[in-house]
Amino acid sequence: MDLWELVGVAAGLILLHEGGHMLATRALGGRVLGLVWRGVAVGVRLDVAALSPAAVAWTLIAGPGAAALGAGVLAAAWPPARAAVLLIGGCDFLLNLLPWGVVPNDGTRLWRWWRTGRIASNTAILERKRPR
């Protein structure tokens, strides 16, 4: 696997990750407001005002879950790259679900929800917009 194939796999898994958040949000009754670009980092802006905290937690889990599923399918379909794809997919899954505390990643938001029973709504990624 060459460098450009690695970059393509990583970019594809990021798109699957963000797409998982968007699909789960729409399926559970929320709205997708758009993409957020911060340098090389990408995220989605979601309106989760209509969702319960448990539903918001599922939207957070859906991103890493979609990327992990995509990595598994790609690894099965592309045997020569299996080890690299699984490594990239596993790192994506762990880095997104482990709470860092400083960076507002999916794991940090889930950990805060588990600790407090509330999903923080003061972030650029998850927004609670009230209808006017």
Image: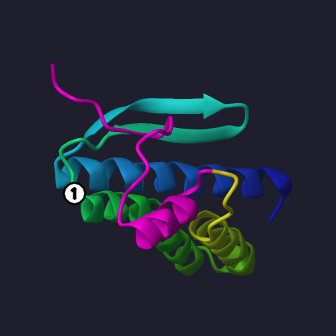
Picture quadrant where residue 84 is located: bottom right
Viewed as shown, does residue 87 lie left or right of 93? right
Q: Within the magenta stretch, is there residue 36?
A: no
Q: Position of residue 78 (x, y in %)?
A: 61, 74
Judging depth in this view, the residue of 56 and 85 nearest the camera is 56
What amino acid does circle 1 point to? Ser
Q: Residue furthest right?
A: 3
Viewed as shown, does residue 117 lie left or right of 87? left
Q: Residue at x 66, y 60 (%)?
A: 101
Mark 1 residue crowding within 10 angstroms, few (<14) / some (14–19) / many (20+): some
Report the residue marked by disc 1: 52
Q: Is residue 82 visible?
A: yes
Quarter of the C terminus within the rendering: top left
Q: Residue furthest top?
A: 132
Q: Is residue 65 visible?
A: no
Q: Residue furthest front?
A: 116
Q: Within the magenta stretch, is there residue 110?
A: yes
Q: How is the image coloured?
A: rainbow
Q: Residue at x 53, y 41 (%)?
A: 43
Determine whether the residue tagged by mark 1 lies in a helix, strand or loop.
loop
Q: Residue at x 53, y 31 (%)?
A: 36
Asked if 52 appears above or below 129 in the picture, the reply is below
Asked if 34 appears above or below 57 in the picture, the reply is above
Judging depth in this view, the residue of 116 and 66 nearest the camera is 116
Q: Position of residue 79 (x, y in %)?
A: 64, 80
Q: Position of residue 64 (x, y in %)?
A: 50, 65
Q: Position of residue 41 (x, y in %)?
A: 67, 40
Magenta highlight range: 104-132
